[in-house]
Image (cartoon, grey):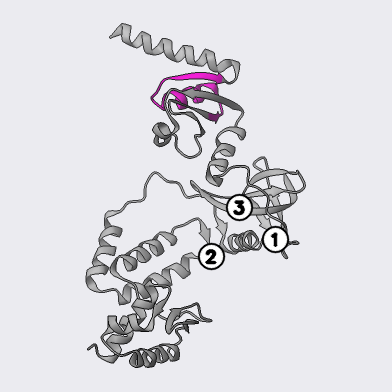
Amino acid sequence: MLETSARLLKLLSLLQTHRDWPGADLAERLGVTTRTVRRDVERLRELGYPVHALRGTPGYRLGAGASLPPLLLDDDEAVAVAVGLRTATSSSVTGIEETALRALTKLQQVLPSRLRHRVNTLQTATVRAGVAPGPEVSADALMTIADACRRHERLRFDYTSARGGASRRTAEPYHLVNFGRHWYLVAFDTGRDDWRTFRVDRLRPRPPAGPRFTPRELPYDDVAAYLSHQLSARAWVCQATVRLHESAEAVADRVWPGMGAVEAVDEHSCLVHLGAETPDDLVWMITSMQTGFTLVSGPPDLAVALRRQAERCLAALDRA
């Protein structure tokens, strides 16, 4: 039979990994009587753990309380939390760096040496390179937007466009998306009567939130795909659509976020909608997907740029 302190930790661990526990099952796992389980549950409640009794059957459930009690983490969970906190100290979200560092320090102080070694080994061996820091966004702004999304409340905010124009907007917020190095809000702009995406670093909420709204049907089943389409095509001067001679599933790994939006056609082909600053950039993007293609639409200069690239490749072979 487990000693009382060890048994309490075991009981807490069981409650944290299962939503509903019949009292008899807990007693069997702990090797004690159901009466002892009841006493141990009372001790956990005295320590601040909100253990609720189940209705209709003798059993228990761990709920959310008014304050955060100590948590029990297994080895993999503890390492994952430590790595996540260390990453958060260098994120683009302002206002959480010091908090994340304090939490990481507390966690590392209680990590067993074997786990502390794993976390330190990963940190020592990792070099962050090739990724420029994204524009900073306020943690308070993110929480304000997320709360409006959850409550289905209209959001009022000041917005600065990419060209520096300032405007005051009212929108129905739906999702926050962390895309590449930026945070975006996908929302229905009531003033423009259309769906829009907004860069959160250019957005300043104006509380309080507006009235509640009835959620609309989203323009895409996949919000990330919708955002990818907005960023990869509509935001650029040069836009094109090509039909690839492979399925959408086959080329999915070759179309990175922000490059283009893939639209399935059949099991042998798909459409990719692209956007870039110049026709030559479009040529590079199209040919980088390493498959046969047919140009469906694009600026007149795109066909010229494709022929020029083909001639360069043929000339290289002739010289070889």
Query: Where does the C terminus fall, quadrant-wise?
Result: top left
Marks 1 and 2 sit apart, C-alpha to C-alpha, by: 25 Å
Instruction: Give the magenta range.
Output: 273-296
Q: Which amino acid does label 2 sit on?
A: Gly
Q: In which quarter of the image is residue 293?
A: top left
Q: Is mark 3 on a helix, strand or loop?
A: helix
For residue 72, side relative to residue 299 (left or right):
left
Residue ID at (38%, 13%): 313
Q: Which amino acid does label 3 sit on?
A: Val
Pick out the residue farthest to the top. 318
For residue 132, side relative to residue 302 (left or right):
left
Q: Dot 2, how many residues are within 10 Å of its Cα: few (below 14), some (14-19), or many (20+)? A: some
**Percent coordinates x, y for residue 203 in the rendering:** 65, 53
Q: Dot 3, how many residues are within 10 Å of its Cα: few (below 14), some (14-19), or many (20+)? A: many
Residue ID at (49%, 34%): 259
Q: Is mark 1 on a helix, strand or loop?
A: loop
Of tags 2 and 3, which is closer to the observer? 3
For residue 140, side relative to residue 4 (left or right):
right
**Percent coordinates x, y for residue 16 in the rendering:** 39, 75
The disc placed on residue 95 is: 2
The disc placed on residue 153 is: 1
**Percent coordinates x, y for residue 72 in the rendering:** 35, 76
Residue ID at (32%, 76%): 109
Q: Does the magenta stretch include residue 181?
A: no
